[in-house]
Amino acid sequence: MNAKVQNQVARAGLWCTGFFILALLAAFLGYILYKGLPVLSPHFILGKSSDMMAGGGVGSQLFNSFYMLFLSMAISIPIALGAGIYLAEYARENKLTKCIRLSVESLATVPSIVLGLFGMIVFVNMMNMGFSILGGSLTLVLLNLPMLVRVTEESIRTVPRSYEEASLALGATKLQTIFKVVLPSAMPGIITGITLTAGRALGETAILIFTAGTTVSRHMFDTDVMAGGETLAVHLWYLMSTGLVPDREAIANGIGALLILTILVFNFVLLLPIKLLGRKTKA
């Protein structure tokens, strides 16, 4: 078999693999949406949940999902940006740098249920936060940080060194160069990392079961950080494990479809800035 034939066979194999993955994803998403879309309605999306009676909604859980996501990302992103900038621009290859990278990699490999138990011990019990939105958000920070730090560092390292050298040659300081040249160029990669991290946090359950609990506030759209923080994913788990409502399967199907649509829309909204930044960079 000559090289040309080998190349065609390899290309055909890669195309088949790609189509198989797309077909598998389409079948998975299609089944969830097929079962869940008929359940979705304004009352279901914005209404209160019910513990015993049929016809409940998921309004509080949807709000808690985004509220905790916002709080956790508001804490995670500044820390991750600072750590990524330090590792990429300032850190020398010494024991401290190796220790930081080892800590980040170790934190990334910790199972989420272990992070949940850690959050329950520290935030729920030791700091007396109880099962609350704040405790869940702080524990989600531990889940978000490893990926955000690594993505930030790698995105900064991909910026051509000539950009920094040109900025410094024009008289800009190191800090000005980082914030006006390096970060804007690295922003598409950073936003991609934020998108992936946010999607993972939206679907997280193990962490939030032990820290945010399986209850919600009596008030709709309650911003009290000490209130119960049940999210969509946790409510789905609770319904299918110990739920007593007679229509729990329909509610679970609706939650699955709502989660899929929410993550797709969320990713689409965050991917738009990447395309705009890419066009500006090319221009």
Image (cartoon, helix red, strand yellow):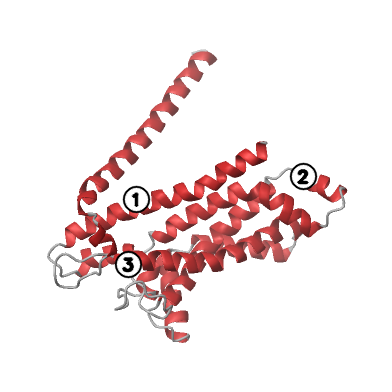
Q: Quadrant of residue 15?
A: top left
Q: Residue at x 32, y 39 (%)?
A: 26
Instruction: Determine the CA span between mark 2 and mark 3.
Output: 45 Å
Badge 2 amino acid: Tyr
Badge 3 amino acid: Gln
Residue 23 located left or right of residue 158: left
Instruction: Determine the CA span between mark 1 and mark 3.
Output: 15 Å
Residue 4 located left or right of residue 52: right
Which residue is the extreme one toward the front?
42
The residue indicated by pointer 3 is: 61
Provide residue 235's location: percent of width, then percent of height.
28, 66
Give the class, few, some or many, for how many residues have Cα within 10 Å of label 3's Cα (few <14, many ≥20).
Answer: many
Q: Residue at x 34, y 75 (%)?
A: 213
Tell which of 249 and 218 is nearer to you: 218
Helix, strand or loop for disc 1: helix
Residue 93 located left or right of residue 273: right
The residue indicated by pointer 2 is: 163
Badge 1 amino acid: Leu
Q: Residue at x 54, y 57 (%)?
A: 147
- Residue 261, which numbered label? 1
**Residue 206 appearing in the image:** no
Tell me whether the residue at label 1 lies in contact with that at label 3, contact meaning CB atoms closer than 8 angstroms: no
